[in-house]
Image (cartoon, rainbow, N blue to C red):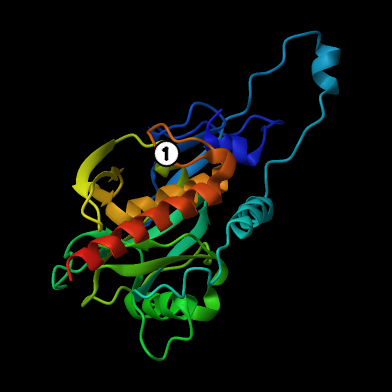
Amino acid sequence: MGPAAAFLGPLQGKAAPRAFSAAYRPRWGLLISAPGRAEGRAAAVAFRAPPRPRGPPTARGAAALVPFPSRESIKGKAKLRLRECDVGDKFSHLPLRKASVLLPLLLRDGALCLLLTVRSMQMRRSPGEVCFPGGKREEMDKDEIDTALREAKEEVGLQPEKVEVICRLVPGIDKMNHLVTPVVGFIEDTFQASPNPDEVSDVFVVPLEYFIKPLNYVALPYKNSSGYLSWMHCFTYDDHERKKSFKIWGLTAHFAVFLAIVIFRTKPTFEVHYDLDNLITSAENGFMNLYASINERNKSSL
């Protein structure tokens, strides 16, 4: 059973329509096809009915039909798991420059998806790279949530009141030693981005399950913010309908993977350094170890 199917629970009842030619296909339960016709639209999803039980007709006819999971039940289950992992302002006191990103969740054709952006080639830092809407904290911002919502409005035209903020997850530290807080929120499934061309060149969505069960993944060696050799996630997501490929890596991939693990509670098909039985504790310990090593390195350079 694929992670999304396990998250939704067993699917029973009448057979669903035949799925489209699949570009991304979990083992059973969900068929995720190539993206829909609308630009930037996530992969379409159809449900595959489980095998019909063998046995006499009377036994088959007696089987109770269970309705497909509703949008509300999918979102509700995700929200519960996210709130269990909310760190609030636990790390806000750390003496690092602050930044935030918004991890916008939405449902497309019954599947949880993430909205991502491509940075404009005019940007001084990381032009052309995939990222979440976000940026550095400004004086007007009350907290990390304010920063994420303000930046999302500036970059893709997402109005703050249209975001249902659910939680803040364990932060990360970028290569400029900013404390980056991921803010998770649900947005309207029909949201149409209005990218600011000075900052964003493209907007697209990816099925969340892709970040624990990818088709194209490598782990890349790199020196982390503390100067130690580590590994980073690197995904290539092919949007066949738009004939585009997107490389998702670095801190963006790190946040996407952790979000998918939090919601699906499933071990990815690649190695991660989390204890799934103690997910938040292991994530917080990993972050604090990184912070301590950066702090120690800064002291030694004085």
Image x and y of residue 40, in percent = 35, 57
Task: Indicate the quadrant containing the C terminus: top left, top right, bottom left or bottom right.
Answer: bottom left
Q: Position of residue 193 (x, y in %)?
A: 38, 70
69 displayed left or right of 233: right
Q: Amino acid at mark 1?
A: Ser
Residue 176 in percent (x, y) is at 23, 68
Q: Which residue is mark 1?
A: 33
Which quarter of the picture shows residue 122? Answer: bottom left
Q: Is residue 153 above or below residue 179?
A: below
On the image, the x and y values in percent for residue 17 come to 56, 34
Residue 173 visible, this orientation: yes
- In the image, taking residue 194 as reference, residue 78 lies left or right, namely right
Residue at 23% across, 66% down? 298
Helix or strand or loop: what does disc 1 sit on? Answer: strand
State the residue lying farthest toward the bottom: 140
Residue at 22% in and 41% down: 220
Count how many numbered circles sit on residues in the image: 1
Please name the residue shown 42% across and 47% down the image: 257
Q: Residues within 10 Å of mark 1 (few under 14, many from 20)?
A: many
Q: Nearer the viewer, residue 105 or 176?
A: 176
The one nearer the camera, 224 or 187, is 224
Q: Is the N terminus in the top left, top right, bottom left or bottom right quadrant?
A: top right
The image quadrant of residue 98 is bottom left
Q: Is residue 93 above or below residue 223?
A: below
Does residue 111 appear anywhere in the picture? no
Question: Relative to 117, does residue 23 appear above or below in the rendering?
Answer: above
**Observer-nearest residue: 292 or 138?**
292
